[in-house]
C-alpha cells in the first residue's frame, strides 16, 4: 500500500505526458509540413526547408481577407450572443416563470441539432433577408449553438453568486436591469470572458454553416483553405494557413488559461 | 427557492427571438418541405408521408443508424473515462495547471475541415510521423481497404479532437471541491479509489451529464470530419447518418432530405428530453 501510494503521482504524471503528446502530435506534424516546400518552385526544391508558405499567406489577398472575415464574424457573433445570453441566464438562474423548464429544453435541443439539418432553410431564409455571402449571416447562424451554450455557462456563474446580493440591491432601490448592469456584470466578469472564449472556439472552427452561407463572398479562413485544394494541392501552404488559423485561438487560450483552470461552473436550472 | 415571477419571460425574450429566427423558423420550413415533392421551390405537390415511409423502410437508413449508434457508443466509452482520468491527473500547482489545460485544449481550435487532412498527413507513409512508424508494428499500407483500420483512424481522430472538452468540463467541476473534503478523507485513511468514488465522482455528475449529451449528439451526427478520411468507405462502412443527409442535400432532393432532417430532429428532441429527465433526477437526489 505504501509503495503504491508513492508511485501514484508519478503514474499520473506519465499518463498526462502521454496524453499531451497525443494531443500535440498532429499539430507537430502540421507545423513541420508548413515549413517544407511541397510543390516545385524556382527558388526551392521539393522537400527543402522554407518560409515561402508563410510568405504566401501574406501575399495572397484571398487568404488575407479570409482572416479578416473570420475575425469579424466571430466578433459579431460574440457581440450578439453575450448581451442576449446574460439576461436569459439571469432569468433561468433566479426566476421561475411559466414554461421555463420547457424553454431551456428547447434551447438545449437547438444546441445539439446538427447544423446540416438546418442548412437548406437557413440558406433560403438568409437569402431573403439579404445576409448571405456576408459575415453577418454566419455570425447570426452560429448563434444557433453558441447562444444555448453561453446561457448555460453564464447561468452556472450567476447561480454561484449568493441570492442575498440581489435582495440587498433591490432593497437599495435597484431595478433588475440596473442590478444586472451595475452589480452583477462585474461579479461575473471572468464568466463572461470564459463564455466569450467558448463562443470564439465553437464559431471559429465551424464549417457547415460557413460553407453554405458563403458561396461567392465573405469566405472565412476554413473555406479559404478548402479552396486551396485542387488538381495540384500545395499541402505545405495548406498546413501553413492551418497553423496561422490556430494561432489566434492558441493566443487567446494561453491568455485565458487561468480562468479555465479556476474552473467555470456548470449547474442545472 | 426561486421566486415565482413571470417577468422572467422579458429577460429570455431576446434569446428566444434569436433562436426562433435561426432555429425555429428553419425547422418549420423543413417540416413543411418534408411533405412535398419539390422539383423547384415554386412547383411542388403534396405527397403526404411518402418520404417518411420510404426512409423508415429503407435498409440503408437503418444501416447508417446502426453505424452511428456504434460510433457514438465507442466514442463515449473511450472519451468519458479518458476525460475523467486526465482531469484527475492534472497537477495542483497553479502555474502548471494553466499550461497543461491550454496544451490539452489545442485540438479544439483547429478548423474542422482541416482535421481529416491533418490525420491523413500524419498517416502518410512517406512523410507522416505515424505513417513511417506504423508499418513496423503491422499497420498495413492499404489501411483504407480495411473496415477496422478506417474505423480506428476515425475514432482516434475524434478522441484527439474532443476528449479535451471532457477534460476541461471535468476539471472545472473538480476545482469546486473544497480542500477540507480531501483533508477529511486523508484523516479517515481513504485511498485514491475511495476519494474518487465518494468525493470526486459525485461532484462530476452534473458536468458528466453535459459532457455525455454534447459528445453523444456531436458524434452521432458527425459530418465534416468523418467523410474525407475514406469517402465513407470501404464499401460504405463509414457512412454515418449526417453524411447521408449531406449527400442528399448536395443532390438537391428537397423533399427526402427534409424528411430525413425532421427524423434527425426527432432523435435530437428525444435525446434532449432524456437528458432533462436525468438532470431532474440528479437535482432531486442532490436536494434530498
Image (cartoon, coloured by chain):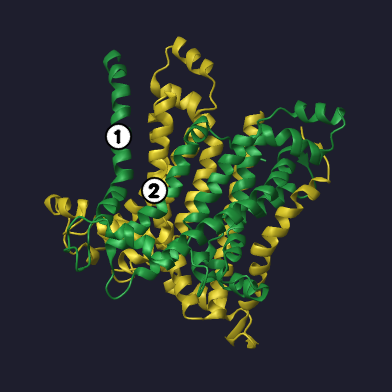
Chain colours: A green, B yellow
Residue at the (74%, 54%) spot, across then down:
B14
Specify the farthest residue to the bottom. Answer: B43
Residue located farthest toward the left when viewing the structure as drawn: B136
Q: Is residue A223 visible?
A: yes
Task: Work out whether residue B174 or residue A57 is closer to the camera in this orientation and state it.
Answer: A57
At horizontal 37% and vertical 45% (from top left) the residue drawn is B78
Chain of the residue under the numbered disc 2 shown in the image:
B
Residue A251's label in the rendered image is none
Residue A17 tag number: 1
- Give left or right: position of B42 versus A61: right
Q: Is residue B30 visible?
A: no
The chain ID associated with circle 1 is: A
Tag 1's secondary structure? helix
Measuring 32% from the left and 74% from the top, which residue is drawn there? A230
A47 relative to A69 in the view: left or right: left
Locate residue B122, reporting x and y percent: 25, 55
Pinpoint residue A13: horizontal percent, then vertical percent.
31, 28
Rounded to the nearest whole Å, what is the CA distance between mark 2 and mark 1?
16 Å
Helix, strand or loop for disc 2:
helix
With B157 as the anchor, is B205 left or right in this view? Answer: right
Residue B107 — which label? Answer: 2
What is the quadrant of residue A56 in the picture?
bottom left
Left-right relation of B3 to A151: right
Asked whether B50 or A46 is in front, the reply is: A46
The image shows residue B29 at horizontal and vertical percentages of: 65, 73
Question: The C terminus of chain A appears in which quarter of the rendering?
Answer: top right
Amino acid at each position: 500500500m505504501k509503495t503504491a501510494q508513492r508511485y501514484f503521482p508519478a503514474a499520473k504524471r506519465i499518463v498526462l505526458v502521454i496524453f499531451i503528446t497525443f494531443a500535440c502530435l498532429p499539430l507537430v506534424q502540421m507545423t513541420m509540413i508548413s515549413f517544407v516546400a511541397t510543390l516545385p518552385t524556382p527558388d526551392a526544391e521539393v522537400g527543402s526547408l522554407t518560409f515561402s508558405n508563410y510568405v504566401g499567406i501574406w501575399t495572397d489577398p484571398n487568404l488575407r481577407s479570409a482572416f479578416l472575415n473570420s475575425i469579424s464574424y466571430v466578433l459579431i457573433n460574440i457581440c450578439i450572443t453575450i448581451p442576449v445570453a446574460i439576461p436569459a441566464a439571469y432569468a433561468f438562474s433566479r426566476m421561475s416563470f411559466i414554461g421555463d423548464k420547457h424553454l431551456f429544453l428547447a434551447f438545449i435541443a437547438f444546441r445539439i441539432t446538427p447544423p446540416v439539418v438546418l442548412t437548406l432553410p437557413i440558406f433560403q431564409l438568409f437569402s431573403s433577408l439579404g445576409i448571405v455571402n456576408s459575415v453577418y449571416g454566419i455570425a447570426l447562424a452560429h448563434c444557433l449553438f453558441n447562444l444555448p451554450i453561453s446561457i448555460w455557462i453564464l447561468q452556472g456563474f450567476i447561480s454561484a453568486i449568493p441570492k442575498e446580493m440581489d435582495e440587498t440591491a433591490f432593497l437599495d432601490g435597484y431595478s433588475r436591469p440596473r442590478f444586472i448592469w451595475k452589480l452583477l456584470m462585474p461579479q461575473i466578469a471572468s464568466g463572461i470572458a470564459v463564455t466569450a472564449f467558448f463562443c470564439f472556439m465553437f464559431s471559429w472552427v465551424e464549417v457547415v454553416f460557413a460553407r453554405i452561407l458563403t458561396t461567392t463572398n465573405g469566405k472565412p479562413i476554413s473555406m479559404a483553405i478548402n479552396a486551396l485544394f485542387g488538381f495540384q494541392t500545395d499541402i505545405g501552404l495548406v498546413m501553413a494557413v492551418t497553423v496561422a488559423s490556430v494561432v489566434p485561438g492558441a493566443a487567446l487560450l494561453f491568455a485565458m488559461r487561468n480562468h479555465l483552470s479556476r474552473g467555470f461552473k456548470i449547474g442545472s436550472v | 427557492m426561486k421566486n415565482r415571477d413571470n417577468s422572467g419571460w422579458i429577460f429570455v425574450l431576446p434569446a428566444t427571438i434569436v433562436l426562433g429566427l435561426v432555429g425555429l423558423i428553419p425547422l418549420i420550413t423543413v417540416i413543411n418541405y418534408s411533405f412535398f415533392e419539390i422539383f423547384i421551390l415554386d412547383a411542388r405537390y403534396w405527397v403526404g408521408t411518402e418520404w417518411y415511409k420510404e426512409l423508415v423502410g429503407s435498409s440503408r437508413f437503418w444501416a447508417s443508424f446502426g453505424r452511428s449508434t456504434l460510433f457514438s457508443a465507442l466514442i463515449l466509452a473511450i472519451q468519458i473515462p479518458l476525460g475523467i482520468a486526465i482531469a484527475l491527473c492534472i497537477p495542483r500547482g497553479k502555474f502548471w495547471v494553466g499550461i497543461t489545460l491550454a496544451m490539452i485544449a489545442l485540438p479544439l481550435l483547429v478548423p474542422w475541415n482541416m482535421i481529416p487532412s491533418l490525420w491523413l498527413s500524419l498517416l502518410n507513409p512517406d512523410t507522416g510521423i505515424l505513417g513511417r512508424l506504423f508499418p513496423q508494428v503491422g499497420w498495413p499500407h492499404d489501411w483504407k481497404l480495411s473496415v477496422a483500420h478506417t474505423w480506428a483512424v476515425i475514432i482516434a481522430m475524434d478522441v484527439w479532437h474532443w476528449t479535451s472538452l471532457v477534460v476541461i468540463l471535468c476539471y472545472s467541476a473538480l476545482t469546486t471541491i473544497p480542500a477540507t473534503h480531501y483533508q477529511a478523507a486523508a484523516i479517515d485513511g481513504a485511498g485514491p479509489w475511495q476519494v474518487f468514488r465518494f468525493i470526486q465522482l459525485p461532484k462530476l455528475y452534473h458536468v458528466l451529464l453535459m459532457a455525455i449529451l454534447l459528445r453523444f449528439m456531436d458524434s452521432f451526427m458527425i459530418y465534416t470530419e468523418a467523410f474525407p478520411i475514406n469517402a465513407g468507405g470501404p464499401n460504405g462502412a463509414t457512412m454515418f447518418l449526417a453524411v447521408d443527409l449531406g449527400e442528399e442535400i448536395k443532390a438537391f432532393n428537397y423533399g427526402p432530405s427534409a424528411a430525413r432532417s425532421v427524423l434527425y430532429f426527432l432523435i435530437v428532441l428525444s435525446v434532449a428530453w432524456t437528458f432533462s429527465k436525468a438532470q431532474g433526477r440528479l437535482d432531486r437526489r442532490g436536494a434530498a
